[in-house]
Every structure is written in C-alpha cells, then in structure tokens.
Image (cartoon, rainbow, N blue to C red):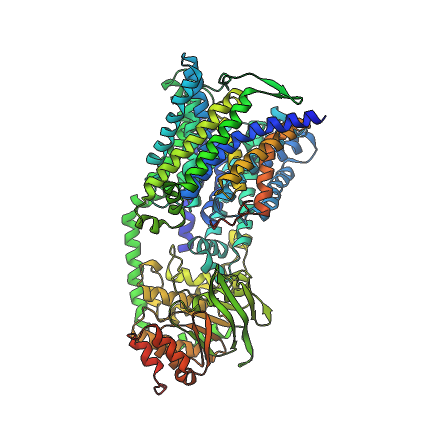
Amino acid sequence: MMSDLLQLVWSGLALGAVYGLVALGFVAIFSVREIVNLAQGEYASLAGLSAISAVAAGVPLLFAVVVVVPFVVAVSVAVERVAVRPVRHMTPLVSIILTLGISTALKAAMLLFWGPEAKALPDFPGKDFVFAGVSVRSQELWILGVAAVVSYAVIAFYEHTTAGKALRACAEQPIAARLLGISPRTATMVAFAIAGFTGAAAGVVGSPIYLSSWSSGLTLGLKGFVAATLGGLVSFRVAMLGGLLLGVLESLAAGYGATGYRDAVAFVVLLVVLLIRPRGLALKPTGVRV
Amino acid sequence: MGRLRAFVPFLVLAVVLAIAPIALPVNLVNMGVYALIYGLAAIGLSLLMGLAGQVSLGHAAFFAVGAYTQAILVTKTQVPGILAAVLAVAASMLVALVVGLPLLRLRGHFLALATLGLGIIVAVVARELEVTGGTSGIFGIPKPSFLGRIYDSPQEYFWLLAPFVVIGLWLAQRLVHSRTGRALGAVNDSEVAAECLGVNTYALRVRVFVLAAGYAGLAGVFYAHWLAVVSPEAAGFELSVTLLLMVVLGGLGTVWGAVIGAVAVEALDEGMRSFIPKLIPGASGEVQLLGFGIVLVLLVVLLPGGLAQLWARVTRRRGIAVATAAVSRAEHDGNDAAMEYSGLQALSRLLAQADVTESGSPLLSIRGLTMRYGGVTALGDIDLDVRAGEIFALIGPNGAGKTTAFNIITGVLEPTAGTVTLRGTDVQGRRPHVIATLGATRTFQNLQVFGSTTVLGNVKVARHLRSRSGIFRGMLGLAGREEREIEDWARTAVAALGLTEHADQRVTDLAFGQQRKVEVARALALAPALLLLDEPMAGLSGTERDSLAWLLRRVRSAGISVLLVEHDVDAVMALADRVAVLDDGRLIALGEPEDVRANPAVIAAYLGTDADDDALVRAAAARPVPA
C-alpha cells in the first residue's frame, strides 16, 4: 500500500520534471517580453521526434541528443526572427494569436513529416533497479538529473550573471535597459533560445517514457504553462516545483482510479490557482502586472 | 434613410444565401453548410474578441456543450427538437456563466489559457462520461423536420441555417452599435476612463461571454443534427483554433468578418485537405492545420486587421469622400459655435440632471488619506472636505501628490490607509464605476480619450449611467428613443465646450487642447454631482481658458461641485472658492484663495521649488482678485 503510494509519487516526480522543464521555457520568455509562447510544447515534441529519426538513421543516441538540442534552439530563434520580431504592436491578444499560429503550423509540419503515430526514443544508458519497494527506471533518474542541471543553469544565468539580469531588466524597464545598451531585440532572441533549449531538453529526456508525437506538444505545453502560472510566469523555482507537483497529482489521480481524468487535473489546478491567487503562488511579490 | 441603408448589406447577404444552394454544385453547398455552422459560432467569438477584448482559446467547449445537450435530448428523451435546441443553447450559456464569473476577473494571457484549459476539461469529461457515449460519442441524431419538411440534403439544410446566420449577424451588429457596444468599445480604448464614466467592465464582459457561448451552443445544435454524430472532437483544440482563425482572418472588431472569415477558412480547409496530400504523398490527418497556422502568423505580421482591413484599403477612396462630406457639414454647423440661447437652456437642463445635495453640505470627505509606494510616501495623512456647489482647487508643485489624490478619490488607486466618503458612502478601494454611480467622475491629466471613435462618440459613452437598455434591447433595436436622447444630451455637452464643429471628427485628429475639452465635455455629459478635473486648462488658449472658467461657474451654479487640479495658479485663484495646497504629499494650506496666497508655507513651497518660475511666484505674491 505504502509502496504503491511511493511508486506513484516517484513516477509523478519524473513526469513532473518534464513539465517543469517546459515551464522554465515559458518563464524564460515571459520574464523578458511578456509573451506566453504557446509553441513551447512543440519544441519538446520536435526534439523528441528529431532524435528518434536520427537514432533510426544510425546515429548513436547521446550524439543524436547533442545534435538535436541545438537544432531546436535554432528553430526557436528562427520563430523569434520570422514571426515575433516583425510585429509592431504586441498586445497579449496579438501574442496569443501569433504564437497559437506558430504552434499550429509546427504541429502540422510534424504531422506531415513524421505521420500521426507516437514514437519512443530508446532509453538512455543505465540500469533499472528496485529501491525500497519502488521500481526505479534509469530513464527517470536521467529526467530528474537533467531537470536539476538545466534549472540550476537557467536560474544561475538569469539571477547571477550580468547578461541574465539585463534580460529581465528589459521587461521591467525597457527604456532604462536601452539606455544601458541592452537591446530588447537581442534580449528577446536570447530568451527564445533558452526556451528552445529547455523545451528540447524536456523532449529528449521525456521521449523514452512518455513518447513523442506531432500532437503531444499541446498538452505538454499546457501543463508546462500551468506549472509556470503557479510561479506567476516569472519565478523559475516555483515553475519547476509546480511542474513536479502537477506530475505527482496526475500520477496519483491516475493511480487511484481516475485514469481518464488525468489530463484534466492540471487545468483544475490552473483554475483553482488563478481564482485564489491570480499572481501565482510565488512567495515574494514579483512586481509583474497581470 | 440611414436606417434603411444599414439593411442593404443584410439584404444582399440574404439573397446570396437564398440563391447559393441552387447556383452552386452540391460539394460546395456541403462546404457552405459547415461555413454557416462555424460562422454562427464565430460571430459570437467575434463579439467576445472584438467587442469585449477577451480571447477564448476554448470556444469549442461551448460548441460541444450545445451539440452534446441536443444529441442527448433528441436521442435519449422525448423532448421535441425545438425545445431541445433552446435547452442546449441555455446549457452552453449556463456553463459560460459559471466559468465566466470567476475567469473574467483575470486579464490577458491568463484568461486565454484558462479557456484553453476549459476546452480540454470539456473534451475529457465528454470522453469519460457514460451519458455522452465515451470516445465514440452519440450517434443516430435524426435530421430535423418542421411542418412536414425534412431538412436532409445539403441544400435544404443550407436554407434552414441561412436565416439563423443572417439574423444572428444582424443582432450582433446591432449590439456593436448599442449602449453596451459603445461602452465596451470605450473599454477597449481606455478601460480606466470608461470605468470612471460608470461602465462596469466586468459585468459587461460576463454578459458578452455568455452571449458568445449562446452563439456557439446554437452552432453546436446545428452541427449535431447535420453530422448525426457528436464525439469529443467537437470540443477539440482544432475546432477552437479554426473558430479563432475565422475571426482573425475576417477582421477583429467587425462581426461581418466572422461570416466572411468562416467561408474563407472552410475554403482553405477544403483546399489544404486536397492539395497537401498531392504535394506530399501519404499525408493524412489534420494536415490543413499547417495552412491555418501559417495564415494566422501571416495575418498577425502583415494584415492585423484581417480581410476587413483589406476591404477598407480597397474602398478607401469612398471613405475619404464620406469623411469630407461630414467635415463640410460640421463646418456649416460651426457657424453657431457661440452658444445660442437654446443651447444654454439645453445645458441648464443637462446640469439639472445632476443629483446634487443642498449647497454647502459635505459631499466628499477625506480622512487620514495615506498612500505609500514602498518606502516613498506620496500622500501623508490628508484630511479635506469638498462641499456641495463649490469649486475646490488642489494645487502644489509637481510630484506633490495631486494626481495620486485624484486617483484614490475616483477609485483608480487603493489607498494605503484612510477613508474617502462620498455622499455618506465609504468608497476607498471601490472600483471607479461604483464611484461614478455615486455621482463623481473625472478627466485625466494624461489624456484618456476613446481613440477609435468621434468626439460625439466619446461623449455619448458618458450617458451610460443615464440610460438603461441592456444587451437584449440593444440587439433587438428597441432602444431607438433612448439612443436619440443620448445623442441630444451628448451634443449639448459638446456644444457647451464649443466643440460642435468637431463633433463628428475622429477625436485623435484634434489638437491636444481640444482633446482635453472633449474629456471635460464627456465628464459633464454624465451630469455628475462632483466633477474632478485634472489640469483642464493645459494646452488651452487664453480665450478658451476664459470660456472654460465661465462654464465651470455655470456648473457650480447648478449646485455641482468641482474639484480642480491646475497648474495655472492665476486661473485657480480667480475661479476657486477654496484652495488646498499640497507639497511633498502633505497638506500645507487650506482656505480661501487670498488666505492661501498669503500663507508663508505656500510661498516657501513654490519659491523653494523653482525660483525662476515666475507664474508661480506671481501667484504667491498678493494681488487683487479679478472679478
């Protein structure tokens, strides 16, 4: 009984770490440009599917991953250059319609290229084992490890480097940032690159367990968004923790009988959080208007 | 004549829809049926996005609620089809009301994503529940039949649908031009100004959200009967994107765009479905989404106004001709810019609408008002009273806290501490529209005109609280008399500020000083008991200042109180009954103009800030009060 619970929590944490990685991408962009990038989930499915094709073509797994992640970063930067930059009056409404269009086009392009079936990347190297009655897949350790490293790196970059602080300054004081020689354009591009990176990381580590398909980015992106919302879309830490929490809740919901409703869990959480604390659950006030 | 002209496009649409099923081959008629079904839902979404400025990414949820309710009622109960349809639409609207009440308090991104979540929840619930038939859904829904006629061919169904679309579009169009539409249009231009004129943004948004869901629910009903099957895809993300694309492609802010967009998107859908597999052999599934996505991005980047913008570009020549006619008519009216006797009488009647209390009684009481931003105290422990029927001026150097005080009194800001009592009601921290309802409205130092409309259109918004008609009367066109009254009173206020010749000009085409006068006219048209003016003289010429001062005295004589923030100290001293001086967030003097003028603290405050500012120095020096 107890081990069942532990098992569900453990699998939920791994799933949640994937959501958390996607959530980091939302925060990376929103804290610089106040755009919710609805194509965030597509970065993960694109990375997963590309890596699967590379492996199928005979490229060694880890090498495929090393190639695919920069590819998705490049796609994200291209999205910024081609679609986001030319828009003159970016309002919330416009940014939603725009990124919805990007997301839809990416989805359909993946459908055309890879077809409708969901596919899995082979497991990363390592051995599965049982610990305290909980069976642990080595891939789950990979997921949690990558999530920890990536979130540490992103937080360190945004909070402890001059370049990272400058990015956030663009959102809070665009004119002052410009006076200090920080170009909002460059800042947006860097933010999209980071979002592409975290999305791609989620895609490649998650694919062996949760599969990748042309349409998997939709729910993945939405759940990442829910996690990011818990942190008011500006806190990386709360976004990652929120992702883990969602993963555990979904896993418990599925484990205790409501398998079909697992996709609804995140949105019930979203609605509840938005109603109770529209600015998110971050403890410190963020100062970002909503 | 103008009324009749408004009918023409609808007549043309009706004729086109009547002929289309005969003139077109059956596959195009079939496509047309889908275009009409989705077009109906898109009209509602267009109202929500264009009018209420809210985006729903899960609009298919309401479509699905309508479709499922209809399917369940006609296949599993004995409820007659028409009653079922009414119940189905009601169910959609009820769901919208329940989720809209909390959700519409959210802004921008969050509302959009919350509705997206709602779409997914509805799809999940439909898939899981037994009553909705699980993954396979509900099938065997019969084609509708009325009066012995069965609507089972594309042609028949097209004719059944067409009247609903024409009437639905007509009603939506009426709503855009109604009192509700005018208020929401104003909210899109400047939410704070609209609220300060008494527009309850939230309540109106909830209503439009529910109405939009009703349109989607009705479309769902038609969908269920036509397809004979309702499955969880009806709530799907693809459909929500399709509806959104229809609205954006047609042009935000025009309900016609929704129908045009629906036809265009259905044609694009068919085209992509047959074209892409030719281009890429073996492609299957929802490949048309590629086209949808690309078109959405291209629209946002290249043609944000959609097809309506393209249409406006094509017909621009005609537009200029119409505008010229309007200007020449306005110039003709301009001959009587100096107010005539009849105008003065109308102004008196307008001002008499103000619900004023006995002259001299306390109208506004401020006690211990404090506003801190972090460590900075913008206002520290201010006490003051404004009496009925006086002109009360608030002066002080830049950054003294005058505008902050205005913002708190009008509900734009919530104070850190202290109370604001307006006519016996504590209003600190209440929404601006509540304060407007109590009879206080304002103008803005940083202009907040409603840029998408004319001078008259701006002023008409201020009659919101003085008129009653809601969504239904607006849609059914039953507010004609009230609309004429609104127009008359608005013209009276426009004339009072000498703006008659500009009444039909777009407000943003006016000079700054004129726009400032538009704001005063707007505030006046509400016939408030307390009129708050934030630097109304800025940008006005000497003559204009004199006539504004004349007008304010007239307003005072009607028993209305005026609270004035102004930099022109000479004008203030000449006009005000009492003056309060703020410096660095503190009240340093309060009294009649000549006492305040002689007050050493006031002289120090002004001299201390900028000794070269001779207007202020002159003001601080004792001078005889002009008559």
Q: Position of residue B225 (x, y in %)?
A: 58, 31
Q: Nearer the viewer, residue B79 or B433?
A: B433
Q: Is residue B443 left or right of residue A281?
A: left
B48 to B486, vertically: above or below: above
Residue A270 in view (yes/no) = yes
User: Which picture quadrant has residue B427?
Assistant: bottom right
Q: How many marks?
A: 0
Q: What residue is shown at x 38% (from left), y 29% (from top)?
A: A73
Q: What residue is shown at x 54% (from left), y 60% (from top)?
A: B431
Q: What residue is shown at x 36% (from left), y 49% (from top)?
A: A174
Q: Nearer the viewer, residue B283 or B171?
A: B283
Q: Nearer the viewer, residue B233 or B342?
A: B233
User: Which picture quadrant has residue A62?
Assistant: top left
Q: Position of residue A212 (x, y in %)?
A: 49, 22
B353 to B313, vertically: above or below: below
Q: Nearer the viewer, residue A154 or B288?
A: A154
User: In the orientation shown, which residue stands out farthest toward the bottom?
Assistant: B624
B21 to B176, vertically: above or below: above
User: In the orientation shown, which residue stands out farthest toward the right?
Assistant: A1
Q: Quadrant of the N terminus of chain A?
A: top right
Q: Is residue A261 left or right of residue B590?
A: right
Q: Position of residue B133 (x, y in %)?
A: 65, 27
Residue A114 in view (yes/no) = no
Q: Position of residue B557 (x, y in %)?
A: 46, 80
Q: What residue is shown at x 41% (from left), y 11% (from top)?
A: A58
